[in-house]
Amino acid sequence: MDVFAKISGHEQVVFCNDPHTGLKAIIAIHNTTLGPALGGCRMLPYASIGEAVNDVLRLSRGMTYKCAAADVDFGGGKSVIVGDPLTDKSPEMFRAFGQFVESLSGRFYTGTDMGTTPEDFVHASKETRCIVGIPEEYGGSGDSSVPTALGVIYGIKATNKAVWGDDALQGRVYAIQGLGKVGFKVAERLLEEGADVFVTDINEAAIELLNQKAKGLPGSVKAVKGDEIYAVDADVFVPCALGGIINDHTIGMLKVKAVAGSANNQLEREEHGGDLWRRGILYAPDYIVNAGGLIQVADELYGTNKQRVLTKTKAIYTSLLEVYKHSEDRSICTAEAADLFCEQRIEARKNRSSFFTADQKPKWNVKR
Ligand SMILES: NC(=O)C1=CN([C@@H]2O[C@H](COP(=O)(O)OP(=O)(O)OC[C@H]3O[C@@H](n4cnc5c(N)ncnc54)[C@H](O)[C@@H]3O)[C@@H](O)[C@H]2O)C=CC1
Ligand SMILES: O=C(O)CCC(=O)C(=O)O
């Protein structure tokens, strides 16, 4: 394998190995034009190191776009830990991970993602200040999945508006894949609003818990298994688990009119955005819909202000409507319209950075 060809779009990729704690992690820094890299840390029992490398490279690239779209002073990065979050975690492992993050001297900030929790990062934060999204009692902004889920709800509302001319959540049927930190909260909110949801998760306990919650709520839950979620009679598909789920195999199964969820990298390949568009399925670009968590953790630079985070997260609604309009005006798919917007924003910043100004401490130094 030509490693440098594989990482040619990235600035830096760091392999972290600590035999004492069993830590095997990869940190990928994609682009720091807009600021130091920021991105959560995912822990998964990857089938191979190659799979982990592919995941971290795609996720970190996505963060560059997400940061540009959300207009935060951060660049794109992400990390993955190879292991089963149910059996392989330890406080020492996250402390070791914190030491590796610290070794990057402020080039990379991280927090939770799939398989990791704010509590895991309390351990990491003992070794480095470049940790975001830890509980408020430890000085962080708290669980970033809360604003992520809220942003998904606003994303769904905007998408409903674009498809049906009415942004109400109720009266529609949603197919939710994954009831973890984000998906569960999204499902709860939809049920509170009186919507009906199909759900699936490999973790039966999450489905059981949602069924318990649903008892007092106006909406209804129907659980389905595995791939059945793609083919249910729903209006909106809400992917909240793994990426790559919009692919050659699943696209033909979808009966929905729209896709709007939190999962990162929903399109397996770029052209799947065009495929959805040609089939008349409106795709809400993942990195715009799921930016709520980023908005909250990036806000830690200024000392978190819940009202500010809420206002910026709600703005996902208007950002999405703008993307839909760009896509319509230019006759390009929504994924392409969003990418173009972000690339122009990064390019504009690059030009500005090349203009000499007096030496000034970057804002993010307040964290160090
Ligand atoms: N936590 C956050 O604030 C953010 C999360 N995201 C993305 O949203 C997605 C979900 O993240 P979290 O809720 O934090 O993760 P999580 O680990 O808390 O939840 C993921 C859920 O998906 C389930 N799952 C895994 N494989 C599945 C499959 N094949 N079919 C059905 N369910 C499956 C898991 O059992 C778990 O319940 C991920 O793609 C993540 O990268 C994006 C932005 C921010
Ligand atoms: O939510 C976080 O802690 C950081 C942002 C992130 O990794 C993401 O949006 O995927």
Image: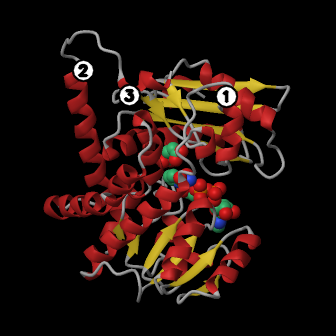
Earlier residue among tags 1 and 3: 3
Give the image location of residue 171, x and y in percent. 41, 89
Q: Which residue is mark 3?
A: 35
- Which residue is rendered at x = 19% and y = 63% of the image? 325
Instruction: Identify residue type, mark 2.
Output: Ser
Give the image location of residue 10, x and y in percent. 46, 28
Give the image location of residue 13, x and y in percent. 56, 26
User: Is residue 242 in view from this perspective?
Assistant: no
The circle drawn on residue 98 is 1
Q: Secondary structure at mark 3?
A: loop
The circle drawn on residue 195 is none
Q: Which residue is mark 2?
A: 353
Between residues 4 and 267, which one lies in front from this camera angle?
267
The crowd level at tag 3 (other Cα within 10 Å; few <14, some 14-19, many 20+) is some
Q: Secondary structure at mark 2?
A: helix
How many marks on residues?
Answer: 3
- Above or below — where is 234 with respect to 120? below
| Left or right of residue 325: residue 174 | right
- Which residue is rendered at x = 49% and y = 64% of the image? 248
Instruction: Identify residue type, mark 1.
Output: Gly
Between residues 247 and 286, which one lies in front from this camera angle?
286
The crowd level at tag 2 (other Cα within 10 Å; few <14, some 14-19, many 20+) is few
Give the image location of residue 17, x and y in percent. 74, 25
- Which residue is rendered at x = 71% and y = 75% of the image? 209
**In whole angstroms, how far apart are the C-alphas of marks 1 and 2?**
30 Å
Disc 3 + disc 2, Cβ < 8 Å: no
